[in-house]
Image: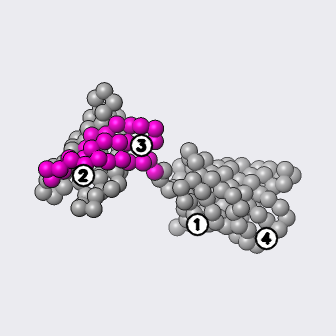
């Protein structure tokens, strides 16, 4: 079961998807820390009551005359998997490269391709909106750090502590 929940200024919307179908959130409220959502599918109404605990929402779903326990774990939205056209500022000269990124939880894998050849990501993390990767090049390690700003990856790089600068990447269309 999945819960896609949007809270915009206290107005709740979204969807709950179960093995039996999808319910749209038609109403929601929080009273004394209890989130109550009213749900509607094509022919019935359901109710979800949830309390936050650590990184989860735990509670009950009442649907089709039955009540069952539910436990939703927060999952970060994957905003960076895919191919990116990038450029680093190498002492005032643009150095173009392509990044291919794959996110699995917080772990990032993938590769980079440039005029100097292909390199792989030896370690990578995407956590709290921040990307940190290390590329293994023939000349040594390149560290890249970035955040997502207006759909672009924007950040800093460090090549062997000898060359540092800024870099930016846009998603390939």
Residue at point 79% right, 70% down? Answer: 116
Q: Position of residue 78 (x, y in %)?
A: 50, 56
Q: CA distance from mark 4 to mark 3?
A: 45 Å
Q: Is residue 63 magenta?
A: yes
Q: Is residue 145 depicted above or below 29 in this figure?
A: below
Q: CA distance from mark 1 to mark 3?
A: 31 Å
Left or right of 94 in this view: 170: left
Give the numbered dot on residue 83: 1
Which residue is identified by label 2?
Answer: 24
Quarter of the image with the N terminus in it:
bottom left
Left or right of 20 in this view: 141: right
Q: Position of residue 49 (x, y in %)?
A: 27, 40
Which residue is identified by label 4?
Answer: 116
Dot 2: element: strand
What residue span does the magenta drawing correspond to? 48-75
Q: Position of residue 45 (x, y in %)?
A: 16, 49
Q: Where on the picture, by quarter, is residue 11?
A: top left
Dot 1: element: strand
The reply to whether residue 167 is visible in this rendering is no
Q: Is residue 3 magenta?
A: no
Q: CA distance from mark 1 to mark 2?
A: 33 Å
Q: Which comes before the other along the chain, label 2 or label 4? A: 2
Q: CA distance from mark 1 to mark 4?
A: 18 Å
Dot 3: element: strand
Give the numbered dot on residue 56: 3
Q: Which comes before the other along the chain, label 1 or label 2? A: 2
Left or right of 139 in this view: 58: left
């Amino acid at each position: 079961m999945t819960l896609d929940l949007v809270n915009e200024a206290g107005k709740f919307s979204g969807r709950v998807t179960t093995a039996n179908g999808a319910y749209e959130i038609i109403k929601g409220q929080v009273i004394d820390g209890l989130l109550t959502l009213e749900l509607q599918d094509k022919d019935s109404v359901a109710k979800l009551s949830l309390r936050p605990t650590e990184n989860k929402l735990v509670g009950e779903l009442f649907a089709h005359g039955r009540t069952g326990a539910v436990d939703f774990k927060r999952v970060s939205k994957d905003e960076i998997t895919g191919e990116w056209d990038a450029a680093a500022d190498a002492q005032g000269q643009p150095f173009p490269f392509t990044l291919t990124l794959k996110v699995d939880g917080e772990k990032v894998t993938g590769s980079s391709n440039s005029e100097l050849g292909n390199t792989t990501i030896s370690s990578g993390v995407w956590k709290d909106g921040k990307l940190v990767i290390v590329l293994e090049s023939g000349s040594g390690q390149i560290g890249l750090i970035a955040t997502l700003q207006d759909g672009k990856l924007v950040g800093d790089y460090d090549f062997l502590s000898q060359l540092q600068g800024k870099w930016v990447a846009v998603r390939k269309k």
